[in-house]
Amino acid sequence: QVQLVQSGAEVKKPGASVKVSCKASGNTFTGFYMHWVRQAPGQGLEWMGWINPNSGGTNYAQNFQGRVTMTRDTSISTAYMELSRLKSDDTAFYYCARGSTVARVPFDPWGQGTLVTVSS
Amino acid sequence: SYVLTQPPSVSAAPGQTARITCGGNNIGSKSVHWYQQKPGQAPAVVVYDDSDRPSGIPARFSGSNSGNTATLTISRVEAGDEADYYCQVWDSSGDHPWVFGGGTKLAVL
């Protein structure tokens, strides 16, 4: 059973950057895509993008292009999501989730989420 | 970009049936996934590819998809089903290929 374990909560000032990690257990890290989804407090889910852990290729949602960078370290089965030029409305839970680029494959499993608070 | 519309809230008494809809233009031609999110937890898939259930999800959860509406049906509702539910599709035409509905809060009366 694959599990995704994310890094702990972060507090950042406006204009700073944050880097969230997502470590996958098991030996299937390069067999799936890793997606990142965020959820502002009390709000819905917003897809941010994916990384192909095998190739390092990425696809970012237009809303985040220019501010988000997704990377991976296959030696430790860990994916990273870095968001720069933080604003107060970037305050949210950030989730990683294993998935695909195939429509029929859902996001499963999800990490436990990382709360990023942006405040001066 | 593609838009998925869900009712903000749905309620059902224990033992009754709850139906949560997800509307989208010709959504019947797409593959719909449903996620359950309980307070303080990450989302988890309960139905995928319109009507399939992951292992461990009870048969009380079922899905259908036709025309402009997909539906998640929860039969014999239990108190533990109270949660937010989100639908999701993949849309190749937009800049947000993975799209979520706004979510529906299921209240168990």
Image (cartoon, coloured by chain):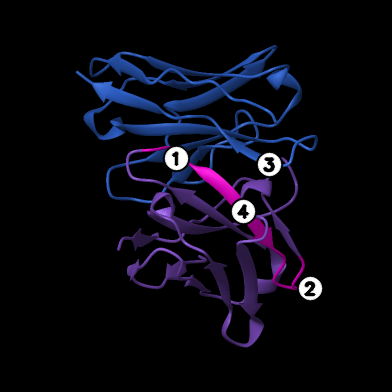
Chain colours: A purple, B blue
Which residue, given by chain and number where applicable, does mark 2 sit on? A55
Residue placed most toward the observer, B74 or A76: A76
Upstream in the sequence, badge 3 or badge 1? 1
What amino acid is found at the position of numbered circle 4 in the picture?
Answer: Phe
Residue contact between numbered discs 4 and 1, judged by CB atoms under 8 Å = no
What amino acid is found at the position of numbered circle 1 in the picture?
Answer: Ile
Asked if the magenta segment contains residue A108, the reply would be: no
Residues beneath discs 3 and 1 located on the same chain: yes
Residue placed most toward the observer, A99 or A55: A55
Mark nearest the camera among 3 and 4 is: 4
| Mark 2 vs mark 4, CA separation in Å | 21 Å
Residues beneath discs 1 and 2 located on the same chain: no
Residue contact between numbered discs 2 and 3, judged by CB atoms under 8 Å = no
Question: Residue B96 bears which disc, if any?
Answer: 3
Q: Quadrant of residue B91?
A: top right
- Quarter holding the C terminus of chain B is top left
